[in-house]
Image (cartoon, helix red, strand yellow):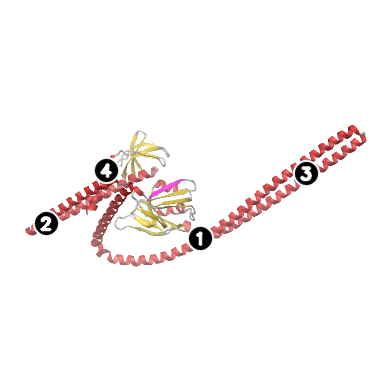
Amino acid sequence: MGKYFYFLFVTTIISSHLYSQEISIPTEFSQDGKLYKSLEEPVQVLTQFQSDEPCLVIDYLGKEKYKIKYKDWQGIVDSQYLVINEDMMDLFYAFQERERIEAIKAEEARKRKIQEIIRKAEEEKNPQHREDSIAKVLETKRQEQVAQELARKEQEALNQQRREDSIEKVLEAKKQAEAAAELARKQAEKLRQQRLEDSIAKVLETKRQELAAQELARKQQEALNQQRREDSIEKVLEAKKQAEAAAELARKQAEKLRQERLEDSIAKVLETKRQELAAQELARKQQEALNQQRREDSIEKVLEAKKQAEAAAELARKQAEKLRQQRLEDSITKVLETKRQELAAQELESKQQKDLNPETKELRNTCHYVMNEIDIFDNVRIIRTEPYKINTSLTAELYKRGNSKQVFFNLSQDLGCASYLPSNRSYVKVTLENNQVVTFFHSWNIDCGNFRFKGVMSNSQINILQKSPIKSISLNGTKHSVYIEQIDYKEFFMDKLKCLD
């Protein structure tokens, strides 16, 4: 009990500290829109803004509404018009924490009121019981004071520890306090759930049994369908892998052939140039010899030497022309062979792609649901897709409750815990092939073991994800992180986000 009050005390201090400071978070608009004066009717528009213009977030009002400062105006705008960053998510979680604390306080007040009514009724029936009740109230009051004093002393000890010890010990104390708070929250949740189950158990027992039978049959069918899909996907991915390997081999062979052709062409050009220079040098020397002979010999000898020089020059010219012709024929032959190999590789890839298309088309164009129904208590639609295989160790699901849209990542690897705590929050970064990056933050309860991440998707993030395939995914837990570049299903968001509509 003391730890529970201590958690409320610490949480209240943190929330008060956050909101005692003036909030000013820089961001920008994700699309064109209007700035409204308030949430009340009639709606009053202050001004219009354009995509990529800067603004300052100064408060979160709930229901996806932020209060912002834009130029000389202060007004209200929906989250879909803003680029969501980590500081804005901190503001969102702080608002949720305040709402949760208020709900806990209201529940405690209600319980105390019920206990007071019961106590007064008992006192009216039995004077002795009234005295006992008074004694119990005083004892309860004393225990609460002791608990408050214990919480105060623990806070003082924590402050002293923070001053004297290292940051690691302070974080350990905070972790223990958060664990105690989580335990208290789960106990309160369990108590509320028990009260709800006790009140409606008799009405829903028959319905529960029917739903259990239906659920068993559905899960068996889903298990069969899932096995079939996994077998099909595995075959498709293996065939695709083989096709990509064949295409890569053909590309490398074509590149090697082009390189060899280029090297051969350069060598032949240099050889031709060398022979031409040699022929020119020979002609020059023969001309010099002819000039010398002209000076020394008769005109007849001079003419004969000139004739021989011209014959040698003609022979050199013909040899050079023959060499150029041979080089041209070799180049054309190699170009045609390279083109033939490229066409063969393209034909092979096209044939393999044609074989893959039927199963790939069924996977990409069909929505597979685990849940798609109306909540009978809250009267909202709940949608949850099946896990889709992103690669051999990672699957992804889409989830929607009312207007809230979320994405679940399930990694068959231990990264510590998936945590929502601001001091060590888990997050996932999705990088698209157009180099845009979308970051999700864990928003559900702490979950340790194999990494099971659950994060909220804003409308602006959804718009970005629908425009480009996945390039890589980075998953970050409380202890470890993993970076995945081998993405087998790159079009997951482009194909499946429509399943939430």
Compare marks 2 and 4 and give the one earlier in the sequence: 4
Disc assigned to residue 359:
1
> Image quadrant of residue 274?
top right
Compare marks 3 and 2 and give the one earlier in the sequence: 2
Q: Is residue 309 above or below residue 404?
A: above
> Image quadrant of residue 119?
bottom left
Residue 66 lies, in percent from the top left, at 34, 42
Left or right of 74 on screen, residue 150: left
Left or right of 249 on screen, residue 147: left
Disc 3 residue type? Ala
Disc 4 residue type? Ser
Residue that label 4 marks: 16
Compare marks 2 and 1 and give the one earlier in the sequence: 2
Residue 7 lies, in percent from the top left, at 26, 50
Residue that label 2 marks: 133
Which of the pair 436/172 is nearer the observer?
172
For the N terminus, the quadrant is bottom left
Main secondary structure of the magenta stretch:
strand
Mark 1 closeness class: few <14, some 14–19, many ≥20 residues within 10 Å: some
How far apart marks 1 and 4 lie (CA) works out to: 56 Å
For the residues labelled 1 and 4, say whether their Cβ atoms are less than 8 Å apart. Answer: no
Compare marks 3 and 4 and give the one earlier in the sequence: 4
Residue 501 visible from this viewpoint: no
Q: Nearer the viewer, mark 1 or mark 4?
A: 4
The local secondary structure at tag 3 comes to helix
Residue projecting furthest to the left: 127
Q: Is residue 96 above or below residue 364?
A: above
How far apart marks 2 and 4 lie (CA) works out to: 36 Å
